[in-house]
Image (cartoon, rainbow, N blue to C red):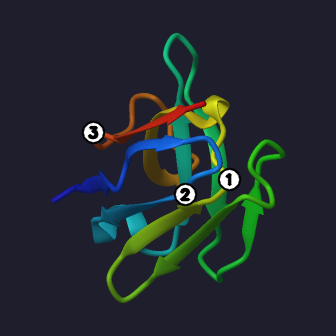
Amino acid sequence: QVQLVESGGGSVQAGGSLTLSCTASASIFNGNTMAWYRQAPGKQRELVARIFAFGHTIYEDSVRGRFTISKDDSKKTVSLQMDFLQPEDAGTYYCNKLPAREYDFWGQGTQVSVSL
């Protein structure tokens, strides 16, 4: 059974924090690089952060130093700690393996809103 379930989104003021969580099925999680993506209204989905199977992490310039990606192999979960949130961080956040094409399976995402 293929599964990606994201949670933890919400509305915060600029400078605030949120922690996103994702539970993935074994077929997606095992042995793969996992990543968080986001999609702002009217824009394409973009990569935010990735974590390799062996634990190494890479962040996009826009979030480096503010976001932290982590995973729990035993639970097949991926988390994204987001600090110092800014309005430009708003959007729907998705987790998935990397690479993931638009025609691959995607979860419903979790919505993040950031107000000034």
Q: Amino acid at mark 1?
A: Phe
Q: CA distance from mark 1 to mark 3?
A: 25 Å
The residue that label 2 is drawn on is: 17
Between circles 1 and 3, the one closer to the viewer is 1
Packing grade of label 3 (10 A; few <14, some 14-19, many >=20) is: few
Precedes in sequence: disc 1 or disc 3: 1
Front residue (pair 80, 56): 80
Confirm or deny contact between disc 2 and disc 1 (CB under 8 A). Answer: yes
Taking the image as shown, residue 77 lies to the left or right of residue 45, namely: left
> Residue 60 at x, y = what percent?
77, 47
Q: Secondary structure at mark 3?
A: loop
The residue that appears at 78% across and 42% down in the rendered structure is 62
Front residue (pair 56, 62): 62
Q: Amino acid at mark 3?
A: Gln
The residue that label 3 is drawn on is: 108
Q: CA distance from mark 2 to mark 3?
A: 21 Å
Residue 109 placement: quadrant: top left
The residue that label 1 is drawn on is: 84
The residue that appears at 49% across and 16% down in the rendered structure is 41
Between circles 2 and 3, the one closer to the viewer is 2
Q: Amino acid at mark 2?
A: Ser
Depicted 53 relative to depicted 13: above or below: below
Packing grade of label 1 (10 A; few <14, some 14-19, many >=20) is: some
Identify the residue at the far top of this view. Answer: 42
Q: CA distance from mark 2 to mark 1?
A: 6 Å
> Residue 108 at x, y = what percent?
27, 39
Q: Secondary structure at mark 1?
A: loop
Count the numbered circles shown.
3
Taking the image as shown, residue 114 lies to the left or right of residue 73, namely: right
Precedes in sequence: disc 2 or disc 3: 2
Quadrant (top left, top right, bottom left, bottom right) of the C terminus? top right
Q: Secondary structure at mark 2?
A: loop
